[in-house]
Structures are given as structure tokens and as C-alpha cells.
Image (cartoon, rainbow, N blue to C red):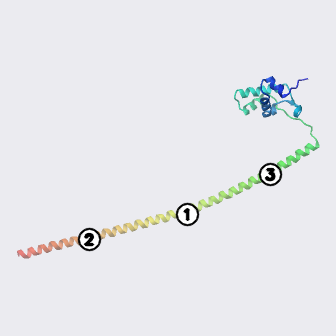
Amino acid sequence: MKKLMTMAEVAKELNIPESTARYYRDHFIDYIPSVGEGRKKRYRLETVEVLRFIAEGFKRKLTAIEIEDGLSQMFPKNIDMKETTATTTAVVQQQSENDNKHYALQLQNALEQMNATMKIIADQKEEITELRKHVADIEKQQQKQEDYINNRLEERDRKLMESLREIQEAKNEIANAREEKKRGFFTRFFK
């Protein structure tokens, strides 16, 4: 018959604190072979090798996931086999039905949230389309205003140039008339 050990004995065998051994056990419980329950729980000799593997993994700075991957390749996983009775079967079936209802409710909630999100997205798309139209209208109005201002400026410049030309022509006529008047005096005087 194989010898069974307490966790204190396993820790002593590995020369590690019992609290550390318990931490390793609790963290990797699926790979720790044991017998019994509660305070009467005892550990098989293989437990020493499993915990040694875990301790070495932590010493080599491996992550818990990496250690668990190594354990899955080196040691069998524990499977708790209990007698199945009509009561446990009914409980499992009830739990399964409850899980199905829970998942159906979660799915329904997710679909409702997705539907609400899709509605929001559709509303936002519609609003974006309206805003784009509004921006296009504003750009058209701005272009019309720019064209109007440019036309008014061109018309003002044309009128200003005409006025300047008329003023220049008037100045020329006045200068010519003065010149003519001066010539008229001398011409009269010397005749």
C-alpha cells in the first residue's frame, strides 16, 4: 500500500514552507493527487513530484500558465469520480436548464443592446447626411456671396476708373482751354 502524507509532510519533504506548498496546491489543484476531504485529506507520493516541478518552475521565473502547460505534459489531471444518482442527475439537469435560460437571457440582452446600438448608428448616419447637406448649402451661399462681392467690387472699380478718366479729360480740357486763352491773348496782341 502506498504511503499517504499530510501537506506538512509534503512541505518538509520538499524543504519549503507549508504555506508555500499549500499555495502551489491551491493554484494547481487539478494536478495534485489526494485522498479524502477536509482535514482528513492526505496526499499521495506523486504529490511531492508535482509540487517539486511547480517549485522549480517558479524558481526559473516561469509564469503560472507556463508551469500549468508543463504539468499538463508531465502529470495526469485529477478527475473526481462520484456516484451518479437520480438526485445528482436532476440537479445537473436543473443546473443545465438554468444555464440555458441564463445564456438565452444574456443573448437576448446582447441582441437588444446591439439593436439599440444599430439604431444609434443609423440615427447618427442620418444626422451626418443632413449636416453634409447643410454644409454644402452654406458653401453654395458663401460662393454666391463671394461672387456678388467680387462683381460689386469690379463694378465699383470700373465706375471709379470711368470717373478718373472723366476727371482727367476735364483737366485736359481745362488745361487746353487755358492754353488756348493764353495763345488767344498773344495772338491778338501781336496781330
Bin the neighbour count of mark 3 within 10 Å (Cα to Cα): few under 14, some 14-19, many 20 and up. Answer: few
- What secondary structure is found at the residue carrying circle 3? helix
The quadrant in which the C terminus is found is bottom left
State the residue position of label 1. Answer: 134
Relative height, residue 64 to residue 163 (above, below): above
| Residue 11 picture quarter | top right
The reply, left or right, for residue 16 in relation to residue 44 is: left
Question: Which residue is pictured at 6% across the width and 75% down the height?
Answer: 189
State the residue position of label 2. Answer: 167
Give whichever of discs 1 and 3 has the lower sequence position: 3
State the residue position of label 3. Answer: 104
Give whichever of discs 2 and 3 has the lower sequence position: 3
Q: How far is the residue under mark 1 from the one under mark 2?
A: 49 Å
Bin the neighbour count of mark 2 within 10 Å (Cα to Cα): few under 14, some 14-19, many 20 and up. Answer: few
Q: How far is the residue under mark 2 from the one under mark 3?
A: 93 Å
Identity, as a three-letter code, of the amino acid under mark 2: Ile
Give whichever of discs 1 and 2 has the lower sequence position: 1
The quadrant in which the N terminus is found is top right
Relative height, residue 55 to residue 102 (above, below): above
The reply, left or right, for residue 175 in relation to residue 45 is: left
Bin the neighbour count of mark 1 within 10 Å (Cα to Cα): few under 14, some 14-19, many 20 and up. Answer: few
- Expressed as whole percent of the image width and height from the top left, the position of residue 165 reads 27, 69
| Residue 53 picture quarter | top right
Question: Which residue is pictured at 81% across the width and 23% down the height?
Answer: 13
- What secondary structure is found at the residue carrying circle 2? helix
Relative height, residue 92 to residue 131 (above, below): above
Identity, as a three-letter code, of the amino acid under mark 3: Ala
- Expressed as whole percent of the image width and height from the top left, the position of residue 155 reads 37, 69
- Mark 1–mark 3 CB contact (< 8 Å): no
Camera-side residue: 105 or 187? 105
